[in-house]
Image (cartoon, rainbow, N blue to C red):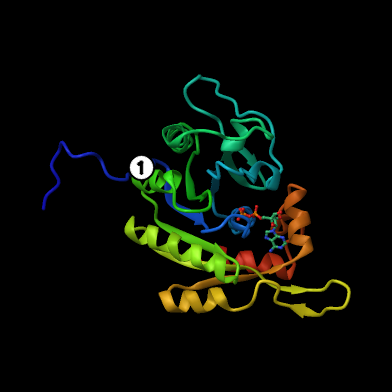
Amino acid sequence: LRARKSEPAGPEPIPGIARIIAIASGKGGVGKSTVAANLACALAQQGRRVGLLDADVYGPSQPRMLGVSGRPASPDGKTILPMRNHGVTMMSIGLMTNEDQAVVWRGPMLMGALQQMLTQVQWGALDILLVDLPPGTGDVQMTLCQKAQVDGAIIVSTPQDVALLDARKGIDMFNQMKVPILGMVENMSTHICSQCGHEEHVFGHGGVASEAAKLNVPLLAEVPLDLQIRLASDGGAPITVSQPDSAQARAFHDIASAL
Ligand code: ADP
């Protein structure tokens, strides 16, 4: 069937942005934003022109993780200048609201805010725009896939059954939206005691690897549950920036190299 002219426009590429990659999870708190921030910095270190759009409306943590604050300027009153740190061009819904203000927007407002961040921010020329999505399968995910041509999604999960269950729903949604799954990341994979070196699998082990194998998608990295990763993110310089040669940073570089 040929599309008729009167039919609504499908997803379109955004001028200047070569690839859009969504970072998604089924559940909250599994480390999706941590992966997005570290991956963005790793890509920048590899010489890629990278942007990070923080669309996690319910918990926008990228300003803190990337050490960015203040309100983005709009010199012409129409477009918005993005922020930049650690070589990453970024914009966050958290910079459009107060940090301790809850976002109690209805669907249409969320969609409007997302569309504004996609099309009115002066992203410039980018090789990759990462989009840090809210957890789950709601309005923001649908709007992104409908309005912009998303080239692929990376699914972050812990090895825990409850997280994997929700991750599967996320994968199903991307399949329905015809967005390819680029791979899965197992976060909080192992914990190594900083005192005695004992290794423990706090959330189980291998669950994401076996899920990825079942779905025939790559397992892009296994990221340990690690105090340094948490401290670095809270301090505004992700571990890929603050300890670029560490084993932890290498896990994020593995993901970057696969893109
Ligand atoms: P999400 O975006 O999935 O809600 P976050 O990235 O905000 O999750 O992570 C939730 C919390 O867990 C944050 O405090 C973060 O610093 C911490 N965290 C995430 N991944 C790790 C990790 N691999 N090791 C230690 N702490 C982590």
Of residue 57 and residue 122, the one placed in the foreground of this image is: 57
Name above or below for residue 75 compared with residue 60.
above
- What percent of the width, then of the height, locates residue 119? 43, 35
Q: In which quadrant of the rendered view does residue 143 lie?
A: top left
Name above or below for residue 236 compared with residue 240.
above
Of residue 7 and residue 106, the one placed in the foreground of this image is: 106
Q: Which residue is mark 1?
A: 147
Name above or below for residue 147 compared with residue 41.
above
Q: Residue at x 84, y 71 (%)?
A: 194
Mark 1 surroundings: few (<14), some (14-19) or many (≥20) residues within 10 A: some
User: Which image quarter has ligand 1?
Assistant: bottom right
Which residue type does callout 1 highlight? Lys
Judge whether residue 137 can be spotted in this image: yes
Q: In which quadrant of the rendered view does residue 153 lie?
A: bottom left
Q: Residue at x 78, y 62 (%)?
A: 227
- What percent of the width, then of the height, locates residue 259? 49, 63
